[in-house]
Image (spheres, rainbow, N blue to C red):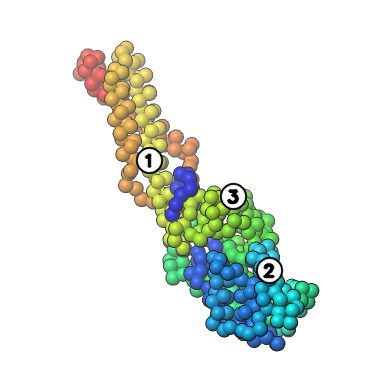
């Protein structure tokens, strides 16, 4: 992974909840058209051809690439000629094309989520049944509608498959062992998301599509489906309000607010520049492997910083109080300036070595407890101080050493 800021390493050690995107993170992001169900009056070739008209040419959208690839293998005749193309909008969940058919009539072509397109048409009675059956099998379901601007009708239903990554289940289990709960956040239909979630080991309730419930906790649902980009921001805020430290995956420019709001924004490998600049770390490879590595490396770094801080508090407690007690006990400065400088230099070298200490990752998410850290350091410092005072007292009162020898003993 590539951290965009130095503090991201420490932030990765603290996350308790990971909001993982489905496509490209938990799945292979290798979409392909699995089934085409044309409506009466259309055939498969025309449905794919119409869908290709409403797909970006040469873009990085895997859905559009899969449809254009399938359409190229089943070329239809008498397709309308493309005039204007409107790319996919996550708010409407559709892309749109304006074309002119061979008869010179302007037609509107819509391609998008089944529920979104169905709301603009009057589909046949069996259309919803077909879509529900496909979603229940884990397919991503799209609808294609075509017709005059004011009277588009459903042309067909396209099912796309995107198999889960083989390593997703293992990485989710590893994150769970590290105390990080993973939830799926996707814009896909609940039925489709639930199938993929079960395949990667995310068993639990599916949050209904729509507005994120108030006071929601990560333990309430394993899957949040039908979530718009602004819904990701609301979800992060809801988890943070319940006291959790959140990591959020995202890839689009409209994911930037959620990535910025999360304590650990994670831009996937195919993310836009806007998403990458808003995130704390950028993955260089698909999947959860980089996130697991970030969490482990962050916790190793945390343990080293914790050791360094504890050592610093302990040494400062000993050095300051020992100088005071030595002055009272002997009537002289117990350390000369040269000896103090040597101790400071050797202490710095010790601190530098602690920064590369061989430690184990923390078993659970980290959090700084400054009060407890200070109390532990002071306790250890006072314990060492008692030992130092006892040695100095023996050297002065029992062995009768002079001040020069006492300074050597104190050093």
Q: Quadrant of the C terminus?
A: top left
Earlier in the chain: of badge 3 and badge 1, it is 3
The x, y position of residue 239, in whole percent, is 60, 54
* CA distance separating discs 1 and 2: 62 Å
Q: Is residue 77 above or below residue 386?
A: below
The x, y position of residue 9, in whole percent, is 45, 47
- Locate residue 147 relative to residue 357 in the image: left or right: right
* CA distance separating discs 3 and 1: 30 Å
Point out which mark residue 181 bears. Answer: none
The part of the image, by quadrant, that contains residue 303 is top left
Q: Which residue is mark 3?
A: 261
Of badges 1 and 2, nearer the viewer stands 2
Q: Few, some or many C-alpha atoms within 10 Å of disc 1 (few <14, some 14-19, many ≥20)? A: some
Residue 273 can be seen in this image: yes
Q: Residue at x 48, y 45 (%)?
A: 5
Residue 113 can be seen in this image: no
Mark 3 and mark 1 in contact? Answer it, CB < 8 Å. Answer: no
Q: Which residue is mark 2?
A: 84
- Locate residue 71 relative to residue 85 in the image: left or right: left
Point out which mark residue 307 bears. Answer: 1
The x, y position of residue 356, in whole percent, is 33, 43
The part of the image, by quadrant, that contains residue 53 is bottom right
Mark 1 and mark 2 in contact? Answer it, CB < 8 Å. Answer: no
The part of the image, by quadrant, that contains residue 69 is bottom right
**Disc 1 on helix, strand or loop?**
helix
Q: Is residue 42 above or below residue 98?
A: below
The x, y position of residue 192, in whole percent, is 59, 73
Earlier in the chain: of badge 2 and badge 3, it is 2
**Disc 2 on helix, strand or loop?**
strand
Earlier in the chain: of badge 1 and badge 2, it is 2
Q: Residue at x 77, y 73 (%)?
A: 149
Q: Quadrant of the N terminus?
A: bottom left
């Amino acid at each position: 992974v590539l951290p965009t800021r130095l503090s991201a390493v420490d932030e990765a050690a603290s996350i308790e909840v990971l909001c993982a995107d489905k496509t490209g993170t938990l799945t292979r992001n290798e979409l392909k058209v699995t089934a085409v169900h044309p409506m009466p009056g259309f055939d498969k070739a025309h449905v794919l051809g119409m869908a290709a008209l409403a797909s970006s040419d040469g873009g990085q959208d895997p859905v559009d690439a899969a449809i254009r690839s399938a359409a190229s293998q089943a070329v239809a005749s008498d397709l309308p000629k493309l005039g204007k193309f409107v790319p996919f909008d996550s708010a409407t969940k559709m892309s749109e094309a304006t074309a002119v058919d061979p008869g010179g009539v302007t037609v509107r072509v819509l391609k998008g989520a089944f529920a979104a397109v169905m709301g603009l048409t009057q589909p046949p009675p069996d259309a919803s049944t077909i879509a529900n059956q496909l979603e229940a099998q884990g397919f991503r379901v799209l609808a294609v509608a075509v017709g005059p601007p004011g009277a588009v009708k459903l042309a067909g239903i396209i099912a796309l498959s995107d198999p889960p990554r083989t390593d997703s289940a293992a990485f989710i289990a590893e994150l769970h062992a590290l105390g990080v709960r993973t939830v799926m956040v996707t814009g896909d239909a609940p039925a489709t998301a639930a199938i993929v979630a079960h395949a990667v080991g995310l068993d639990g309730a599916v949050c209904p599509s729509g507005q994120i419930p108030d006071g929601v906790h990560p333990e309430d649902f394993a899957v949040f489906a039908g979530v718009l980009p602004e819904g990701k921001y609301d979800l992060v805020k809801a988890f943070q309000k319940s006291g959790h430290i959140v990591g959020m995956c995202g890839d689009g420019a409209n994911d930037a607010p959620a990535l910025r709001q999360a304590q650990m924004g994670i831009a996937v490998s195919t993310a836009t520049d806007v998403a990458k600049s808003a995130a704390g770390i950028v993955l260089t490879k698909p999947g959860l492997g980089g996130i697991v590595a970030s969490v482990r490396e962050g916790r190793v770094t945390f343990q080293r910083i914790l050791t360094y801080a504890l050592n610093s508090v302990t040494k400062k407690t000993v050095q300051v109080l020992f100088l005071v007690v030595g002055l009272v006990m002997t009537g002289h400065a117990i350390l000369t300036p040269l000896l103090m400088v040597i101790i400071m230099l050797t202490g710095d070298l010790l601190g530098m070595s602690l920064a590369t200490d061989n430690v184990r990752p923390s078993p659970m998410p980290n959090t700084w407890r400054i009060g407890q850290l200070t109390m532990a350091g002071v306790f250890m410092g006072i314990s060492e101080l008692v030992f130092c005072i006892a040695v100095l007292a023996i050297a002065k009162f029992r062995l009768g050493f002079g001040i020069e020898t006492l300074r050597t003993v104190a050093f």
